[in-house]
């Protein structure tokens, strides 16, 4: 039988995921909040996430071996029914955490890259994303020659994505009359 504490940890996680429905949280972000507040320890957080996944209360997308969680419809229904069992102080802690960390959490969740093997042996495709809410604002795919380069490109994506976006936007939206007329063959 499940203890009251275990039940509360599940509700806290569901509450967190419900309050950030515009993006997903990583297991590290969830664990950091719960552990920093002293609610429980690391192992219990991960066991609780596994139980919520097994019962389809949350879903997970893995990006570069990092799980990113979101609440499911089943989880929303359960939370709606049991939310009154979460103490107001804990709800306030969650909301305060999101207020102070929102920009960082949102940026981390919405600016990411991953890689996968190409159809060409030995090559990899690196795909970088910048999202806002559920919309993809910017998506880039490049082919690289090896896995080490793919990992490096993914690691650099967050820091470089805004300047890459600015460069591409400037090039695509510039008035290119002079370039196109100077590059056309002379008659």
Image (cartoon, grey):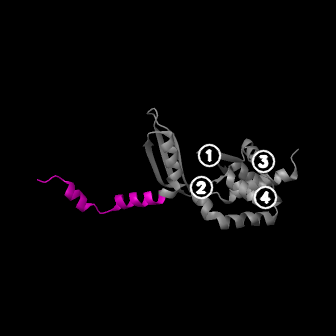
Callout 4 secondary element: helix
Q: Tell me whether the residue at label 3 lies in contact with that at label 4, contact meaning CB atoms closer than 8 angstroms.
A: no
Q: Quadrant of residue 132?
A: bottom right
Q: Earlier in the sequence, mark 1 or mark 4?
A: 1
Q: Earlier in the sequence, mark 3 or mark 2?
A: 3
Task: Please tell me whether mark 2 or mark 4 is closer to you in this view.
Answer: 2
Magenta includes 172?
A: yes
For disc 1, the marked residue is 61
Contact flag, marks 3 and 1 (Cβ < 8 Å): no
Of the image marks 2 and 1, the number of the one nearer the N terminus: 1
Q: Position of residue 20 (x, y in %)?
A: 65, 59
Quadrant in which the N terminus is drawn: top right
Question: How packed is label 2: few (under 14 Cα within 10 Å), some, or many (20 or more)?
Answer: some
- Mark 1, secondary structure of its residue: strand
The residue tagged 2 is 109
Q: CA distance from mark 2 to mark 4?
A: 25 Å
Please state the horizontal and vertical placement of residue 121, each as a whole percent of the image: 45, 32
Spatial CA span between label 3 and label 1: 20 Å
- Foreground of the two, 42 or 20: 42
In the rendering, which numbered label is found on residue 83? Answer: 4
Residue 168, label in figure: none
Residue 145: x, y in percent? 44, 39
Name the side, left or right, on which 138 lies relative to 182. right
Range shown magenta: 161-187
Check the image and name the residue furthest to the front: 148
Residue farthest to the top, as pictured: 121
């Amino acid at each position: 039988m499940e203890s009251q504490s275990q039940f509360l940890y599940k509700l806290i996680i569901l509450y967190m995921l419900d309050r950030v429905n515009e993006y997903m949280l990583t297991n590290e972000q969830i664990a950091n909040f719960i552990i920093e507040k002293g609610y429980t320890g690391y192992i219990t957080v991960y066991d609780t996430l596994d139980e919520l996944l097994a019962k389809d209360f949350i879903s997970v997308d893995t990006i570069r071996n990092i799980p990113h969680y979101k609440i499911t419809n089943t989880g929303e229904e359960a939370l709606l029914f049991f939310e009154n069992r979460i103490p107001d102080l804990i709800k306030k802690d969650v909301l305060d955490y999101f207020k102070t960390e929102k920009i960082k959490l949102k940026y981390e969740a919405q600016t990411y890259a991953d890689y996968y093997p190409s159809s060409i042996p030995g090559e990899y495709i690196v795909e970088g994303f910048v999202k806002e809410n559920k919309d993809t604002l910017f998506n880039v795919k490049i082919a690289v020659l090896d896995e080490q380069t793919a990992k490096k490109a993914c690691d650099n994506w967050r820091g470089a994505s805004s300047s890459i976006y600015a460069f591409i936007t400037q090039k695509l939206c510039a008035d290119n009359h002079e370039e196109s007329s100077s590059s056309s063959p002379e008659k």
